Amino acid sequence: MMEYTDVHCQQSLYNMLERNTDSYHNIPLEYKTEKEVLPNVRKFGQAFLPYSPLFQGLLAGKFHSESNFSENDIRNANPKLVGPSFRQYFDGAEQIKKIAEAYGKPMNEVAFNWLRQKEEVTSIIGGASTVEQLEQNIQCTTWDIDDEMMARIDKVLEPFENL
């Protein structure tokens, strides 16, 4: 019987547009990642892995103004990707995409790099369907977001702090 154990790693929903969100696929979350989880990660010296770092592909820059997923696609169950709030998240992602393009970087690299530069984030599990996607994901480790770019990103992300 295990009475107590140390927690060495935490994993929570966390990406540029879902930083302190209330739910995932309409499942209520009992935590706020930036406000509650990350301070504890720092306090207790834990590792942190963000869940859904590319917001189920939205932060990869591949979405169009209307999300038309195949019938069996799990993203159909995410009201943030198919419901009335889709437009807000899509518009935020499009603003990030424009910043990425202005710096000559792919959007997914910017999203991964933003996470990578958070001191609490120790690993990022980025799904890749092809070798090309994997290689592109790895490219985020070859450069850092500079202060100017981060300021532009932070301005876009302000409205998403509690979504």
Image: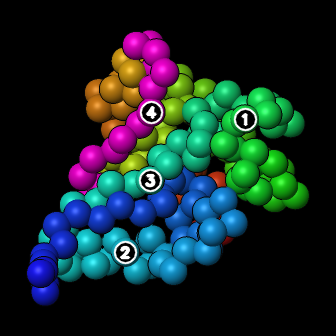
Q: Amino acid at mark 2?
A: Val
The N terminus, quarter of image: bottom left
Q: Dot 2, crowdedness within 10 Å: few (<14), some or many (≥20)?
A: some
**Residue, far front:** 1
Q: Element under label 4?
A: loop
Determine which of the numbered discs, if any, sits on residue 72 in the image.
1
Disc nearer the start of the sequence (2/1): 2
Measured from the top left, where is residue 160 in percent x and y? 64, 64
Q: Nearer the viewer, mark 2 or mark 4?
A: 4
Q: Nearer the viewer, mark 2 or mark 1?
A: 1
Lateral position of residue 73 relative to residue 114, left or right = right
Q: Dot 4, crowdedness within 10 Å: few (<14), some or many (≥20)?
A: some
Disc nearer the start of the sequence (2/4): 2
Lateral position of residue 95 relative to residue 141, left or right = right
Q: Is residue 124 magenta?
A: yes
Using the rendered image of the protein, determine whether residue 88 is visible from the camera's viewpoint: no
Q: Element under label 3?
A: strand
Q: CA distance from mark 3 to mark 1?
A: 21 Å
Measured from the top left, where is residue 92 in percent x and y? 70, 50
Q: Amino acid at mark 4?
A: Gly
Seen at 55% across and 74% down, the residue is 29
Residue linked to disc 2? 37
